[in-house]
Amino acid sequence: MKPLNEYHSRIEEFDIQFAGLQNHAYTFTYFINSAFLRLFEYAPLDDCDVEVQLQFTKKPTLFILDFTLAGTIKIECDRCLAQANLPVKSQYQVFVKTVGTVAEKSDRELDVIFILPDDTHLNVAQLIYEFVVLSIPGKRVPCITLKDKSICDREVLAKWQKLNEPDDVQNPATDPRWDVLKKLKENDKK
């Protein structure tokens, strides 16, 4: 993960000014929608309606960030291309550690962000974006997931099924040589 202070500095509402905070837990709430997603180039989503609760726990040299996402993301069905709102509910935890030098900052650990002692703000926009994107299922078939058959575009499914039929079903004509062999087989049974 890249340091968040280098990216999206223009998204000030996602800045957490931790320099003046006491050592205990704070709660921040963010509402994520299409306007937020447009801030990120090549976002795999166009629209969502997700509430993000962030519990920010400050300790002397460590911050614990507990993200809880709840809401819906709008995705296309891989099968019929219908738009559907897929419910999402997930939790993620990230640690932020203070290090003494820039050299130490380059050492990366999984789910750990390093900041310098002089840093005063932490922007969580990139983390929230990544967690929303991680909520997208690998196989996008919300018609089955939501158990709602009315979502599926029946016309598209019928065309898809017709294209995937074996050739012998679409073209029932057979090779005349096989007809002769079938007659021999029938004669053999008599």
Image (cartoon, helix red, strand yellow):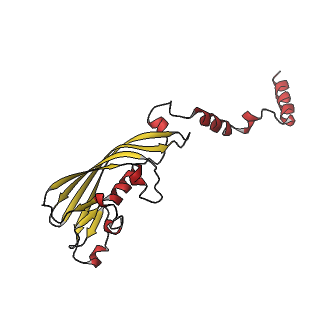
Which x, y percent locates residue 86? 42, 40
Q: Is residue 150 left or right of residue 70?
A: right
Quadrant of residue 154 within the rendered picture: top right
Q: Residue at x 72, y 33 (%)?
A: 169
* Residue 162 spot, x, y in % from top left: 67, 36
The answer, for residue 157, to whether it is visible in the render is yes
**Residue shown at the point (13%, 60%) measured from the top left:** 23
The location of residue 33, given as percent across then percent down, is 38, 48
Task: Confirm whether residue 133 shows in the render.
Answer: no
Split into 4 quadrants, where in the image is the C terminus?
A: top right
In the displayed structure, does residue 21 sit left or right of residue 176? Answer: left
25 in relation to 166, above or below: below
Direction top: furthest residue: 190
Please identify the quarter of the rendering in which residue 24 is found. Answer: bottom left
Rendering coords of residue 164 (x, y %): 66, 39
Of residues 47 and 149, the one nearer the viewer is: 47
Number of numbered markers: 0
Instruction: Classify the position of the N terminus by image quarter.
Output: bottom left
Q: Residue at the location (63% across, 38% down)? A: 160
Quadrant in which residue 64 is drawn: bottom left
